[in-house]
Image (spheres, rainbow, N blue to C red):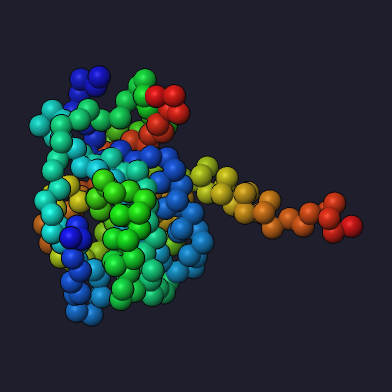
Amino acid sequence: MPLTKPYPVYIELKALIEVVLHALEGLPNEVIGFLIGTPYVWDNSTYVYVTAALRGRTEASETHVEFAADSLGEVVQWLRRNHPNAAIVGWYHSHPGYGCFLSPTDLASHMSCFTMPYHVAMVVDPMKGEAAFFKVVSPSEYEQVCSAVVRRKENG
Amino acid sequence: MSRYAQQWLGERKMVKVVEVIDIKIYECPPPSEPDYEIVTEDHDGNGYDITEIIKILKGREMNERKPDVATNS
């Protein structure tokens, strides 16, 4: 049992691969999607365990992406069917070729759309080969957070 | 009742994730040995180098595109 405080984010390898695959398939455009998992608390720290990534149906360009109008209804149906006990714990999107950070638009989107304290943002750059997790502190401030990629052992 | 309601936000057309049912946050230790393998860790919050994953995924894509010589001959 771990003795240290948990990282803010743990992500299953298969979920990370799904995000990267989505970002590659979307090139040259940006892609966007939801991070599915469970928030937990341990040693007085909240963390999220991301177990799946769900692609959002989008309208996208090379520098802009947005969810299609009825995408959340589909997400809820998918969650009920495949992960009935899971929650939306954050979102991801890609920055093809311009690195991992949150733009002012990303910050505003996160602040207004992902309001739970455990919600995280992930950015992946499939051209530079980078990925990172962020937590938003205020409308003008965010921090890149520590995380771990894990794989559940089949006999575990 | 749906766990999430949907609101639309102006020009950006983002969905607002509204928790209709409170998500209970349970106490649970983070994933660790022996039940989990820690594949890689970002100790310092500097992000990940995912070039190896990209190479593997691109390699898989190339293999899927290769014509099957046996059936095409």
* Mark count: 0
Residue A114 image position (x, y, % from top left): 18, 59
From this viewpoint, is residue A24 visible? yes
Q: Is residue B53 left or right of residue B27?
A: right
* Residue A99 picture location, percent across and down: 38, 56
Q: Residue furthest right?
A: B73
Q: Which residue is nearer to you in this view: B19 or B51?
A: B19
Which residue sits furthest front? B1
Task: Tell me the residue at 22%/28% (across/down).
Answer: B29
Which residue is pictured at 20% across the width and 51% down the height? A119
Residue A76 found in image quarter: bottom left
For the N terminus of chain B, which image quadrant?
Answer: bottom left
Q: Quadrant of the C terminus of chain B?
A: bottom right
Q: Is residue A107 visible?
A: no
User: Does A25 sit above or below residue B48?
Assistant: below
**Image location (x, y in percent) of residue A37:** 29, 45
Toward which corner of the image does residue A9 lie, by quadrant?
A: top left
Looking at the image, is B3 positioned above or below residue A64? above
Residue at (67%, 54%) from the top-left corner? B64
Q: Position of residue A144 (x, y in %)?
A: 25, 47
Q: Give the residue drawn at x 36%, y 24%.
A: B35
